[in-house]
Image: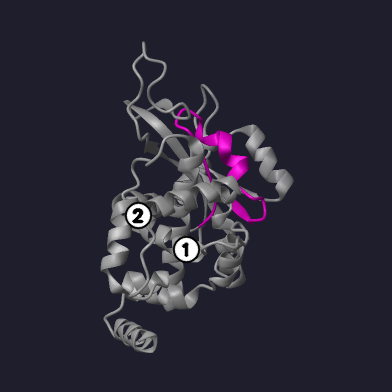
């Protein structure tokens, strides 16, 4: 009876392989070497004698699907169970149970406990760099606002809202939430580094935290311009492509105006990242309360963008 059951399961899985595929997921599965990621994830799951937990790599792949398509935990669980191409990408056979939302929550908690909520992008970028896709010719720096998961607290209510979020004003409109600061490789628009702060933290404060100093040039808008930052670039041997800002009471030279126009036409490439986050991945608002949880969400969003770029670049 057991042999018959196994034969039936093998037949079902062979039928699943024959079903139509998701081109993006198929290319991604072939292009990325999952073994280093699996090894890093598995190291956070010490061996036990009880029932083996769900494979960490399967949970990682489910998280990628979740963040690529802007899904909640229940939605992700449902769609992995329903779509054969997603089930195949995750590594589940037709007879395998789909990890539930509680398992996903615990997986994220384990990532945070082991500090991987700020290291996943670096793990993926090692492969991108080995493939020669991160060229370090020029780095683009910018920041974008993300709405908090909770409403801003009322003035008289100090217990509401999100204690790690902050207020700011953008184009005359008040904003309560977070700010994502990113550094992007100009050639292939791959994210090199990212940080998350409260929305009231000025863009320029995170410049030295996202720029690694190994590029030939760095570009950013006028908000990042300062004499100290120009000196920092000089010390690192990095050409300063930050848009010039005039001193108080002075006007920019015509040469600086032309230079700003040139830099702006290049620097705007970073907006592609923010556009995909907000239009395709639904990432206008953070999903969680507290910086650490939202930092992990941001890390996954960056990984998803870089993996999408990877499949495009390899196919070109």
- In this rendering, the answer to whether 131 lies above or below 162 is below
Residue 271 placement, left or right of 116 = left
Residues in magenta?
Answer: 191-217
Identify the residue at image location x=26%, y=67%.
Answer: 82
Q: Quadrant of the N terminus?
A: bottom left
- In this rendering, the answer to whether 37 lies above or below 205 is below
Residue 71 appears in the picture as rendered: no
Q: Nearer the viewer, residue 230 or 132?
A: 132
Q: Which mark is residue 54?
A: 1
Q: Quadrant of the C terminus?
A: bottom left
Q: Nearer the viewer, residue 284 or 156?
A: 156
**Mark 2 vs 1, N-terminal side:** 1
Residue 35 placed where, x, y %?
57, 72
Find disc 2 in the rendering and name its residue: 276
In this view, the mark in front (2 or 1): 1
Residue 176 placed where, x, y %?
37, 28
SS under mark 1: loop
Q: Residues within 10 Å of mark 2 (few under 14, many from 20)?
A: some
Residue 60 placement, left or right of 127 = left
Q: CA distance from mark 2 to mark 1?
A: 31 Å
Q: Residues within 10 Å of mark 1 (few under 14, many from 20)?
A: few
């Amino acid at each position: 009876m057991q042999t018959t059951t196994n034969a039936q399961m093998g037949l079902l899985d062979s039928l699943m392989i024959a079903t139509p595929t998701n081109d993006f997921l198929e290319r991604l599965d072939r292009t990325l070497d999952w073994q280093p990621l699996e090894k890093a994830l598995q190291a956070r799951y010490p061996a036990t004698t009880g029932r083996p937990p769900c494979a960490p790599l399967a949970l990682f792949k489910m998280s990628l699907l979740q963040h690529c398509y802007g899904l909640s935990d229940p939605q992700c669980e449902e769609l992995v169970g329903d779509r054969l191409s997603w089930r195949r990408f995750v590594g589940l056979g037709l007879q395998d149970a789909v990890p539930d939302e509680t398992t996903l929550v615990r997986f994220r908690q384990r990532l945070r406990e082991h500090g991987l909520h700020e290291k996943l992008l670096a793990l993926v970028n090692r492969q991108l760099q080995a493939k020669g896709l991160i060229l370090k010719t020029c780095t683009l720096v910018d920041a974008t606002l993300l709405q908090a998961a909770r409403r801003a607290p009322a003035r008289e209510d100090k217990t509401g809202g999100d204690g790690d979020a902050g207020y700011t004003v953008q184009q005359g409109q008040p904003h309560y939430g977070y700010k994502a600061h990113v550094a992007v490789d100009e050639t292939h628009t791959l994210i090199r580094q990212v940080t998350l702060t409260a929305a009231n933290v000025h863009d320029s404060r995170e410049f030295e935290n996202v720029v690694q100093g190994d590029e030939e040039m760095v570009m950013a808008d006028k908000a990042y311009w300062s004499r100290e930052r120009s000196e920092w670039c000089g010390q690192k041997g990095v050409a300063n492509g930050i848009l010039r800002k005039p001193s108080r009471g002075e006007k920019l030279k015509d040469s600086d105006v032309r230079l700003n126009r040139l830099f702006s036409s290049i620097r705007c490439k970073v907006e592609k990242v923010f556009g995909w986050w907000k239009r395709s991945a639904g990432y206008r608002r953070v999903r969680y309360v507290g910086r650490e949880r939202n930092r992990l969400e941001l890390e996954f969003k960056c990984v998803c963008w870089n993996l999408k770029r990877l499949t495009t670049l390899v196919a070109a």
